[in-house]
Image (spheres, rainbow, N blue to C red):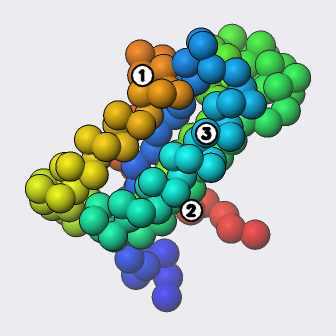
Amino acid sequence: MTNNQQKIMVKLVYCLRRRANVSPDEFYSYWLNTHGPKVKDAAETLQARRYIQSHTCGPELNQAFAASRGLAPAYDGITEVWWNSLEEAAAAMKAPAAVQAMAKLLEDESHFIEFSQSCVFMTTEHVIFDR
């Protein structure tokens, strides 16, 4: 199957910054061990196919990358949630059970995420290489 024939999935990308009153260790532990299982429990309701947490590491290297380009500091991590299509994701988010599940997840996120310093958006991937 060529790239043009592959089914194009979409993903929500959520770039996270931790709340100031939450230490890095508390942030990563809560996100992985408390919030992660809640997302897993809601996966079927949300019709999500995949959920990934990417925890930021290598602070010195991240600072060097940011400084070399004049960028803002690195996010504390990235969440990816995958669906089969944009239409499927949109339809899933309209279902009453999904609305309720998203509200519960949002409430939980308020314990460790600084919303005003984070961002979220939908994407499609375009693989340039995959070695």
Residue at image mark 1: 115
Residue at 56 percent of width and 24 percent of height = 17
Q: Nearer the viewer, residue 122 or 22?
A: 22
Residue at image mark 2: 127
Residue 16 spot, x, y in % from top left: 53, 31
Label ID, residue 30 = 3
Residue at 60 percent of width and 60 percent of height = 128
Q: Nearer the viewer, residue 79 or 29?
A: 29
Q: Secondary structure at mark 3?
A: helix
Instruction: Please name the amino acid that badge 2 sits on.
Output: Val
Callout 2: few (<14), some (14-19), or many (20+) C-alpha neighbours within 10 Å? few
Residue 98 in sight: yes
Residue at 74 percent of width and 31 percent of height = 25
Q: Secondary structure at mark 1?
A: helix
N-term mark: 3 or 1: 3
Residue 87 spot, x, y in % from top left: 19, 62
Of tags 1 and 2, which is closer to the observer?
1
N-term mark: 2 or 3: 3
Q: Is residue 128 left or right of residue 84?
A: right
N-term mark: 1 or 2: 1
Residue at 36 percent of width and 60 percent of height = 42
Residue 24 spot, x, y in % from top left: 72, 26
Q: Is residue 93 left or right of residue 128?
A: left
Residue 96 spot, x, y in % from top left: 11, 56
Q: Is residue 109 left or right of residue 33?
A: left
**Mark 1–mark 2 distance (CA, rounded to whole Å):** 30 Å
**Mark 2–mark 3 distance (CA, rounded to whole Å):** 32 Å
Label ID, residue 98 = none
**Mark 3–mark 1 distance (CA, rounded to whole Å):** 16 Å
Instruction: Please name the amino acid that badge 1 sits on.
Output: Phe
Q: Is residue 131 above or below residue 61?
A: below
